[in-house]
Amino acid sequence: MIEAFEKVNRKFNEVYTKLFNGGNAKLELVDSDDPLEAGLEMLVSPPEKDFNL
């Protein structure tokens, strides 16, 4: 399950950077140690802005 999530996360960043000509994007599981019950946060940073991945 975690391996699949990590693959999706990498693709999400790849697609985001292509759509916006740069920037970063990241998915994070939150609020639970169980990935099937966790929430999902989408962290995005447009080109020329930065956040810590």
Image (spheres, grey):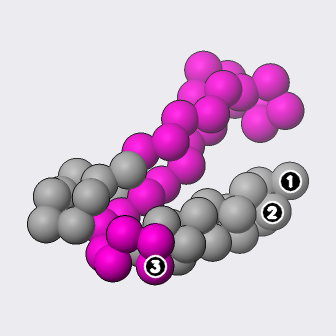
Compared with residue 52, is residue 12 higher up or lower down, i.e. above or below? below
Q: Residue 14: where, in percent of width, then height?
A: 52, 76
User: Which of pointers 3 and 1 indicates the residue nearer the eye?
Assistant: 3
Residue 4 numbered tag: 2
* Residue at 13% in and 66% down: 48
Q: Is residue 52 visible?
A: no
Compared with residue 17, is residue 41 higher up or lower down, i.e. above or below? above
Q: Quadrant of residue 9?
A: bottom right
Badge 3 crowding class, 10 Å Cα cut-off, few under 14, some 14 to 19, many 20 or more, is few
Q: Quadrant of residue 5?
A: bottom right
Q: Residue 8: where, in percent of width, then height?
A: 70, 63
Distance between the alpha carbons at the discs numbered 3 and 1: 26 Å
Q: Residue 21: where, in percent of width, then height?
A: 33, 78
Callout 1: SS: loop
Q: Are marks 1 and 2 in contact (CB under 8 Å)?
A: yes
Q: Which residue is mark 1?
A: 1
Distance between the alpha carbons at the discs numbered 1 and 2: 5 Å
Q: What amino acid does circle 3 point to?
A: Lys
Residue 38 numbered tag: none
Compared with residue 6, is residue 33 higher up or lower down, i.e. above or below? above
Q: Is residue 40 left or right of residue 16?
A: right
What are the residue bounds of the magenta stretch? 18-43
Q: Earlier in the sequence, mark 2 or mark 3?
A: 2
User: Which of pointers 2 and 3 indicates the residue nearer the eye?
Assistant: 3
Q: Nearer the viewer, residue 29 or 12?
A: 12
Q: Earlier in the sequence, mark 3 or mark 1?
A: 1
Q: Residue 25: where, in percent of width, then height?
A: 43, 58
The answer to whether residue 5 is magenta is no
Badge 2 crowding class, 10 Å Cα cut-off, few under 14, some 14 to 19, many 20 or more, is few
Badge 1 crowding class, 10 Å Cα cut-off, few under 14, some 14 to 19, many 20 or more, is few
Q: Which residue is mark 3?
A: 18
